[in-house]
Image: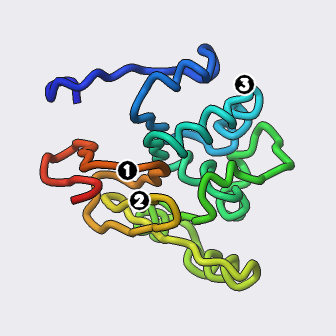
Amino acid sequence: LESLGLSVSTFDLDKQPAEELLVYDVVEFIGGNPFYLLHSIRTHRAEGVLRKLAEEKVLIGWSAAAFVFGPTLELINRYATELNFIGLTDLRGLSLSEIEVLPHYRKMRGRIKDFEETCREYEIAGKKKVFRINDGEGVIIDGEEAILYKEFFETCLAVGRVKQPICVIKELEHCIKK
């Protein structure tokens, strides 16, 4: 991104006040442990800042953040309870969107026994729809509209106001909105 003349900063929510994020037009959270990320957001009282970013700017959640920005961590908890080493009992996500995603679908399907069956059971029990997202795909949410993009740039969930064409660049031909 820097080679394209864009300014890129690294931010650590555990060490910096969340309010500092409000100066950016685009904020992305990159992977990690969804339980730890949710715990950190709550501990540092960052939920209001993230809501503001989602409403007024562009907020991108990769992998773990895609769960956290959604309504719940219940689905990931069915697959990987060991990730919840913090012991979160309140698995409600930030609900920046009511869309639930299952990132890294193809990769995890080959690694975790009964992966698809577990997701299907979760959908039926909760009367929910889960977007199964492979690496290279993404869901763009603009207001109430959600679009699944095949051949995206990485697994992500973007929440916010996309007012003009914005390229989040891995390859120049992949644009969020045309």
Figure quadrant of the N terminus: top left
- Number of residues whose C-alpha sits closer than 10 Å to that of mark 1, classed few (under 14), some (14–19) or many (20 or more): some
Q: Between residues 79 and 8, which one lies in front from this camera angle?
A: 8
Residues 61 and 56: in front is 56
In the rendering, which numbered label is found on residue 162?
1
Choose mark 3 or mark 1, whichever is in front: 1
Q: Of all residues shown, which one is farthest toward the right?
A: 89
- The residue lying at 76 percent from left, 82 percent from top is 125
Residue shown at the point (66%, 78%) measured from the top left: 128
The Cα–Cα distance between marks 3 and 1, rounded to whole angstroms, is: 27 Å
Q: Position of residue 118 (x, y in %)?
A: 65, 76
Q: Nearer the viewer, mark 2 or mark 3?
A: 2
Residue 107 point in image, percent of width and height = 42, 63
Answer whether labels 2 and 1 touch (C-beta < 8 Å).
Answer: yes
User: Disc number at residue 44?
Assistant: 3
Q: Which mark is residue 140?
A: 2
Q: Amino acid at mark 2?
A: Ile
- Badge 3 element: loop
**Residue at x 43% of width, y 52% of height:** 156
**The image quarter in which residue 137 lies:** bottom left
Q: Amino acid at mark 1?
A: Val
Crowd class of label 2 (few under 14; some 14 to 19; many from 20; radius 10 Å): many
Image quarter hosting the C terminus: bottom left
Q: Earlier in the sequence, mark 3 or mark 1?
A: 3
